Amino acid sequence: MGWEIHLHIAAAIAWIGGGFFMFLLGVSLRKKEDQEAVYPVIGPIYGYFETGALIILLITGYLMINNNGLLNILFSNVTNEVMDSLRLKLYIVAVIVALTVVHMAISMMTLHKVKTPFQRFLSKGSSMGIFILNLVVLHYAMVLRDIL
């Protein structure tokens, strides 16, 4: 393994660690006034930081798959523990990317506005989905590491 794995792990720490921080921030800020004071300031900074981490994760993940000769096998009918785990991990990553796009779009559209109930539902739901699915992806990363 080359430099990609190190950058991938650093980006994963930033991505998942940032998610934990925002989760704890959301749980600890119970008052609406506190949330309205904090989120418009920290939200955009967090969003850009996390977008950068996600881009690094996607690029380094692709490079590791390609450099290890797994790209062609990934889209074939080959099934084994490694390929099945990798495919499942990538499906979940695709869902996380989609949820991130939804969350970021709503967050940017409503940065200095009051969210509608539907926007609030989508924003909080996508955020919670990202948080939970990150833990599942982390699990499959460990599964793959154990196999390899």
Image: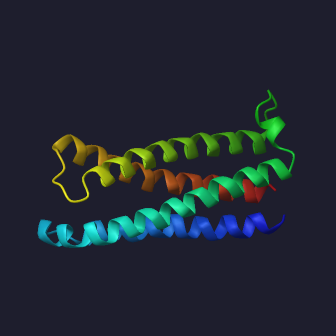
Q: Position of residue 11 (x, y in %)?
A: 60, 66
Q: Position of residue 97 (x, y in %)?
A: 51, 46
Q: Does residue 143 appear in this view?
A: no
Query: Does 23 sit left or right of 143 as displayed?
Result: left
Q: Position of residue 77 (x, y in %)?
A: 79, 27
Q: Does residue 24 appear in this view?
A: yes
Quarter containing the C terminus:
bottom right
Q: How many numbered discs sit on the rendered protein?
A: 0
* Image position of 120 with respect to 29: above or below: above
* Image position of 61 with respect to 37: above or below: above
Task: Name which residue lies at 20% across and 68% down.
Answer: 35
Q: Position of residue 87 (x, y in %)?
A: 68, 40
Quarter containing the N terminus:
bottom right
| Residue closest to the eye, 133 or 68 | 68
* Image position of 71 with respect to 29: above or below: above
| Residue closest to the eye, 60 or 109 | 109
